[in-house]
Amino acid sequence: MTNGKDTPEAAAIRETLEKKRSEDRAQPPRAMDHLALALMVGLGAEVKDALEGLAHLRRDFVDWNEVRVARVQELAKSIGNFPWAEAAAGVLKEEYNAFFDKKGALGFDFLASGKPAESRRTLVQFLPCLGKGAQSILLYEFCPGATLPLSDEGLRSARKDGVGGKNIDRNQLTRIMAESLPLAEAAELVQYWELDATGSPYSEPLKRDAHLAKKGKKGVVKSKSLPQ
């Protein structure tokens, strides 16, 4: 949580988040959304198409528990008219049910119980389908002490928004974020900056995964990837 400071910098960063939320644009993924995006990209979806499919699922289902129990045909119809939609629907249902069976809930609160390095190992073992970018944003949101997962392009986006001045560095931005916003909102703003800079919610790692999947190389998706 924030430490209670109400500096001009803190006020500016909160205003920046509210402005981005009010814009008519793609909304960044939240927690369990990361898994859906990684799975769709691993099946060959372009990032922009995966984000569109995610937006459709958010529109049609109240939460990921509804997705977990929905019929594959319903999910595919919701995702949209993409060649990978039916395959994605099947994998989403499988992986979300496996996640629920393992953890008893659909959430990443278990990451808060360890140090960043330990939590990353847990995440890699539990969800090998997630790329490094998704891992980093989840750790930042849930695990105290995790580093700010902002790419160089994303940092330039923050500077363009006037947060802390045109020459603010990553350490200074990390401090302001910690003072200004709860972790979940800070993670949300990070993703807005990445979307502004690269068109991807977590920049190069996810785009690289998409490129490999498109070329037919070993992708990020591993059927029944959650350990029992």
Image (spheres, rainbow, N blue to C red):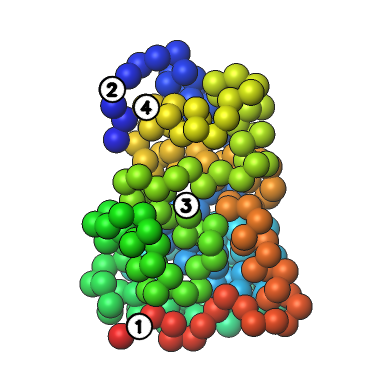
Q: What distance separates the C-alpha of mark 1 from that of mark 2?
A: 41 Å
Q: What distance separates the C-alpha of mark 2 from that of mark 3?
A: 24 Å
Residue 28 x %, y %: 53, 49
Residue for badge 4: 179
The amino acid type, in three-letter code, at marker 3 is Ile
Residue for badge 1: 227
Report the residue that reaches farthest toward the right: 215
Label 4, secondary structure: give it. Answer: helix
Q: Are marks 2 and 4 in contact (CB under 8 Å)?
A: no
Label 2, secondary structure: give it. Answer: loop
Residue 40, located in which quarter of the rendered image?
Answer: bottom right
Q: Earlier in the sequence, mark 4 or mark 1?
A: 4
Say the numbered circle drawn on residue 137: 3
Residue for badge 2: 4
The amino acid type, in three-letter code, at marker 1 is Pro
The amino acid type, in three-letter code, at marker 4 is Glu
Q: Earlier in the sequence, mark 1 or mark 3?
A: 3
